[in-house]
Image (cartoon, rainbow, N blue to C red):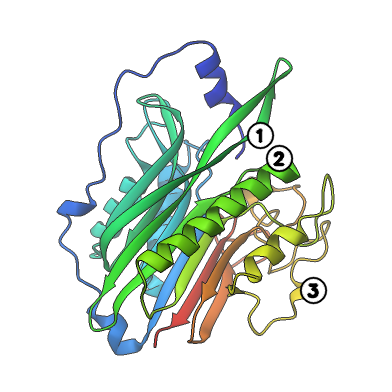
Amino acid sequence: MKQLWFVILLGILGISGCSGLPPDSGGGTQLNSCNDVADRGHLNLLTINLLFSETRTRDSRLEAIAEFASDTSLDVILLQEVAGGVLAGTANSALDLQGKLRERGHAYDLQTAFETGLPGLLMVANAVLSRCEIDFKMTKRLPKASELEFKGHDIKLPRNVMMTRLKIPELGFINVYNTHLCAQCSADELGAQLQVLLTFINDTERNYPQTNPVILGGDFNIDRFRTDPFEERTYYDSIIETGFTDAYANGRPLEKLCENTVIADQHCTVGVSTLDAGDSARRIDYFFVKTPGRILQSSVVFNDLVDKNQVGVSDHAGVFVSIELP
């Protein structure tokens, strides 16, 4: 989360927010109700970190995402680093993307879970856009983690995980979880956030059971090959040990996916965009799925440094998956 120090600095200087952000407008949207999902038997999803601090090019970047969504029949979009407030120049960048999708004739429901910043000035959030009706959402705050230092003080930032329960005609409900775990935090702090996240999913699934796949996506800031300042593979493994599968790794050699931190490949999600040129190559954006069905398709998209046919929309690439429904 680059330049997030600016948000914290504003808080330290005592600049107070004057008004809250408007609520999501998803409830007033006339949905297409995604009747075609049952006909084709699979769900298409994208997760992408939007890079909240890059305001100058945000409109064109959202246009590119909307165009991709239209071309690939995206059903669900998981967003991290959604921005809102006076300093962001918008009330809610997820709401802006919803509008661009509507201009293309696609109606998406929207739910947003703001997690850090100053209301009215600059807020950062997770959000979900869905062609299927969002029956309801639940948000769980994750333990705060020290991600920044200012004048010798550790600044602890809040994070969250949001569950959206989607209603799919003929196929019932499906629970989709979206999160953004801490960056540059300690091993204990990352572990604490992950433990709360997995417990929340387990408790929610027990209380709201369903027969469709359970989908967890987002920016996890976990790379299986990174060992400095601590080994991160154990955190990835802890997700897999709860019964999730790494959707993108399905059918691919796991130990070969973005293994070189110096030379990025088509599997990396960081260090592969013109907005992130020069950063270490890592794979930190994922879809994890508990599913009786198959992963029909998966790809890393918006990685324009690796694939010249792609367009860069963030300092992260996105992950696209197509999941078979029972």
Q: Residue at x 31, y 67 (%)?
A: 166
**Other-residue count near label 1 (Cα within 10 Å), few / some / many at <14 / 14–19 / ≥20:** some
Sequence order check: which comes first, mark 3 or mark 2? 2
Q: Are marks 1 and 2 in contact (CB under 8 Å)?
A: yes
Left or right of residue 321, residue 224 in this image: right
In the rendered structure, the answer to whether residue 210 lies left or right of residue 134 reads: right
Three-letter amino acid code at disc 3?
Answer: Glu
- Compared with residue 83, is residue 174 higher up or lower down, i.e. above or below? below
Point out residue 159 in the picture as x, y percentages from the top left corner. Answer: 52, 41
Indicate whether 62 appears above or below 310. above
- Of mark 1 and mark 2, the one earlier in the sequence is 1
Q: Residue at x 36, y 65 (%)?
A: 207
Tell me the CA gap for discs 3 and 2. 24 Å
Q: Position of residue 305 (x, y in %)?
A: 67, 59
**Against 141, is 79 above or below?**
below
Quarter that holds the N terminus: top right
**Secondary structure at numbered mark 1:** strand
Q: Amino acid at mark 2?
A: Gln
At label 3, counting other C-alpha atoms closer than 10 Å, the crowd grade (few under 14, some 14-19, many 20 or more) is: few
Question: On the image, numbered disc 1 is attached to which residue?
Answer: 147
What residue would you read off at disc 3? 255
User: Residue 161: x percent and y percent?
Assistant: 47, 51
Residue bearing the label numbered 2:
184
